[in-house]
Image (cartoon, helix red, strand yellow):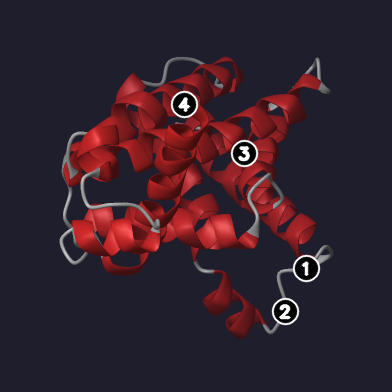
């Protein structure tokens, strides 16, 4: 019985994630989710309490889980560099997104969910910021700070880290556009080239803080 209930819950998460990513929260009905998950109408209330709580569970158990896998890839890449420099930190960030653990299907779903939530922000975005994004930004900020000469105020340093992450996320999000503009597939040769490019580009920005 417990195993069957677990399977139902997982199916609801699977189908809820897919439908929320495709259509957005408001455009998906409880009936549509339960039909796709092959369970009765009461299943969402039984397992999650409401459609809203299912939506939050999708972000916490699926979206945030993928984001933490990316962070773990980042940390594992750095673990092999005991004397890590700024170039290593930035390169590991870029590598985690561009050559990291997400499959192409996971990447698309990950992006679609967040784009829809950003367009109509609510509790899910609050959770992402407080439980995923802010800790990651602060962690990277602490890694970057020792490489700066003199004092750089915390606000400017965080803006700099966000700027680096913004460049990385563009190449993570906009693969079809980038491929067409540069006439290059996102293959095993191009991804390392992108990581090197992003690293070199970002280093110039960080080094400019040292010159002020």
Instruction: Please state, as top left, top right, bottom left or bottom right, where the C terminus lies in the image.
Output: top left
Q: Could you tell me which secondary element the residue under label 1 belongs to? A: loop
Q: Earlier in the sequence, mark 2 or mark 4?
A: 4
- What is the distance, in whole Å, between disc 4 and disc 3 at their CAs? 40 Å
Q: Earlier in the sequence, mark 4 or mark 1?
A: 4
Q: Earlier in the sequence, mark 2 or mark 3?
A: 3
- The residue at which mark 1 appears reads as 187
Can residue 133 be seen by looking at this rendering? Answer: yes
- The residue at which mark 2 appears reads as 184
Residue 2, numbered circle: 4
Instruction: Name the residue at 50% across, 20% down.
Output: 139
Q: Could you tell me which secondary element the residue under label 4 belongs to? A: helix
Instruction: Name the residue at 36% across, 40% down.
Output: 59
Can residue 63 be seen by looking at this rendering? Answer: no
Give the x, y percent position of residue 190: 77, 66
- What is the distance, in whole Å, between disc 2 and disc 3 at their CAs? 22 Å
- The residue at which mark 3 appears reads as 93
Instruction: Name the residue at 68% across, 49% down.
Output: 200
Residue 34 lies, with reference to residue 190, above or below; the image says: above
Give the x, y percent position of residue 178: 58, 74
């Amino acid at each position: 019985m417990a195993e069957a209930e677990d399977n139902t819950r997982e199916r609801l998460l699977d189908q809820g994630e897919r439908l929320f990513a495709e259509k957005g929260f408001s455009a998906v009905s409880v009936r549509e989710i339960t039909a796709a998950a092959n369970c009765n109408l009461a299943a969402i209330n039984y397992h999650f309490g409401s459609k809203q709580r299912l939506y939050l569970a999708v972000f916490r158990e699926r979206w945030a889980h993928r984001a933490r896998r990316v962070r773990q890839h980042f940390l594992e890449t750095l673990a092999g560099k005991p004397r890590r420099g700024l170039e290593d930190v930035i390169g590991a960030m870029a590598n985690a997104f561009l050559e990291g653990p997400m499959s192409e299907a996971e990447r698309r779903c990950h992006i679609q969910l967040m784009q829809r939530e950003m367009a109509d922000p609510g509790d899910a975005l609050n959770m992402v910021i407080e439980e995923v994004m802010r800790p990651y930004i602060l962690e990277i900020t602490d890694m970057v700070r020792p490489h700066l000469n003199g004092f750089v105020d915390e606000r400017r340093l965080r803006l700099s880290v966000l700027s680096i992450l913004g460049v990385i996320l563009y190449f993570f999000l906009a693969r079809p556009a980038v491929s067409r503009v540069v006439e290059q597939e996102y293959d095993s040769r191009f991804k390392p080239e992108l990581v090197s490019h992003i690293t070199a580009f970002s280093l110039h920005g960080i080094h400019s803080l040292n010159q002020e």
